[in-house]
Image: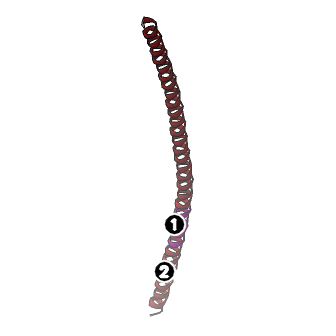
Amino acid sequence: MPMLKKMVAERKAQEVLIDAEAKKEAASKEAEARKIIAEAQAKEEAAIGLSEAEVMIAKAEAEEIQGTKMAAVIEIKAEAMRKEGLAEAEVVREKAMAEAKGIEEKAEAMKKTRRCW
């Protein structure tokens, strides 16, 4: 009987040992799986971050191009306004010159008519 108890005890010990090794193996595999999942999540987040950075760069470049084009348009408008102002000033000057000449001619004519009297 003691021999039977010893065999039963040894059998139970083997079962406990096998169970412990199985649990250890399962824990190891679970840890490896968690590590793989964490690495995959890190790569996904890095890819998202990279995509967001690329979008930000593209937006910045587009805004820079738009700003450059807007500046060019403003410069063109300013030049057109300057030319328009110069043309208006020329018209005013020509009118003033013509008016002055007309007044001068009128004054000369009046002088001649007074001499005649």
Find residue 80 and report its horizontal and vertical position in percent.
Answer: 55, 66
- Disc 2 marks which residue? 99
Q: Residue at coordinates 48% horizontally, 24% vertically from top-left? A: 27
- Disc 1 marks which residue? 81
Q: CA distance from mark 2 to mark 1?
A: 26 Å
Q: Residues within 10 Å of mark 1 (few under 14, many from 20)?
A: few
> Which quarter of the image is occupied by the N terminus?
top left
Q: Amino acid at mark 1?
A: Met
Q: Is residue 75 above or below residue 40?
A: below
Magenta range is: 76-88
Q: Residue at coordinates 53% horizontally, 70% vertically from top-left? A: 84
The residue lying toward the viewer, choosing from 67 and 62, is: 62
Find residue 49 and report its horizontal and vertical position in percent.
Answer: 51, 40
Give yes or no for contact between labels 2 and 1 (Cβ–Cβ under 8 Å).
no
Tell me, yes or no, whether the highlighted magenta stretch contains residue 49. Answer: no
> Which quarter of the image is occupied by the C terminus?
bottom left
Find residue 46 and report its horizontal and vertical position in percent.
Answer: 53, 37
The residue lying toward the viewer, choosing from 47 and 73, is: 47
Q: Residue at coordinates 52% horizontally, 31% vertically from top-left? A: 33
Q: Which mark is residue 102?
A: none
The residue lying toward the viewer, choosing from 7 and 103, is: 7
The residue lying toward the viewer, choosing from 93 and 82, is: 82
Find residue 37 and report its horizontal and vertical position in percent.
Answer: 51, 34
Marks 2, 1: nearer the viewer: 1
| Sequence-wise first label, 2 or 1 | 1
* Count of picture labels: 2
